[in-house]
Image (cartoon, helix red, strand yellow):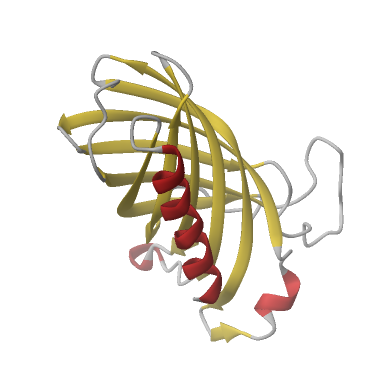
Amino acid sequence: MKKTVIILSILITCVISYGQNRFRAGIKAGISTSQVAGDTYSGFNKAGVEGGLFLTGLLNEKWNAQFEMLFIQKGSKHIGDYKNADYSFYLMKLNYIEVPVLLQYRQKKFIFEIGPGFGYLINAKEYDYYGEITNALTSFNKTEITANIGINYSLYKNLSITWRYTNSISSIRDFASGEKRWYNPGERNNVLSFSLIYKFGTNESE
């Protein structure tokens, strides 16, 4: 909470110092669907939420730079096929504070974005058919580096919606076998997120 207040103060200070003609702050909230590459399961079956703050800076008539600070839920979920006597169950719940830094291109009502991100794991839990798996948090890496790509569509004035795909570049955990290669270092998050965005103030340049 203390870090969030500090970041929010910095965002507000930047907007006041440089003016709303160049910088705009905002909030976003939505849902995430995720899977984990390398956990032997597939499908974006783990639902979660995401939300946070952002600051957008206009670089020129077509390009923006955007800094975000988000809370986002990631992980993996698998439910067996009971009709075929498959009683397997698995649930991975990962909660992150994530900081994407994005380059955005504006085209009419669309904004296309791409950029890296940094994630910090604040909580992790795992469950199987028998219940919670102990010591889950200690088995995961506390940080991750991500790659992000997305599309934003303006609905009305300050309100817009966005779709984003996020993929871990660094591993969130080593494979159970201990096998590790430079091109496949371990388990990695894959996330699709859908959010509603509200920008404060007005900007005549947009």
Judged left or right of residue 133, residue 196 is: left
Residue positioned most to the front: 17
Quarter occupied by residue 161: top left
> In this figure, what is the number of numbered marks?
0
Picture layout, residue 158 above or below residue 186:
above
- Where is residue 48? Give x, y as percent: 38, 61
- Where is residue 116? Give x, y as percent: 62, 37
Foreground pick, 155 / 145: 155
Judged left or right of residue 67, residue 32 is: left
Instruction: Name the residue: 48% across, 22% down.
Output: 59
Q: Can residue 23 be seen in this view?
A: yes
Picture layout, residue 18 above or below residue 119:
above
Q: Can residue 72 be seen in this view?
A: no
Foreground pick, 190 / 63: 63
- Where is residue 188? Give x, y as percent: 65, 49
Judged left or right of residue 140, residue 48 is: left
Instruction: Name the residue: 80% across, 46% down.
Output: 185
Q: In which quarter of the image is the C terminus?
A: top left
- Where is residue 160? Give x, y as percent: 23, 37
Foreground pick, 186 / 196: 196
Instruction: Name the residue: 34% across, 37% down.
Output: 20
Instruction: Name the residue: 59% across, 72% down.
Output: 122
Foreground pick, 5 / 188: 5
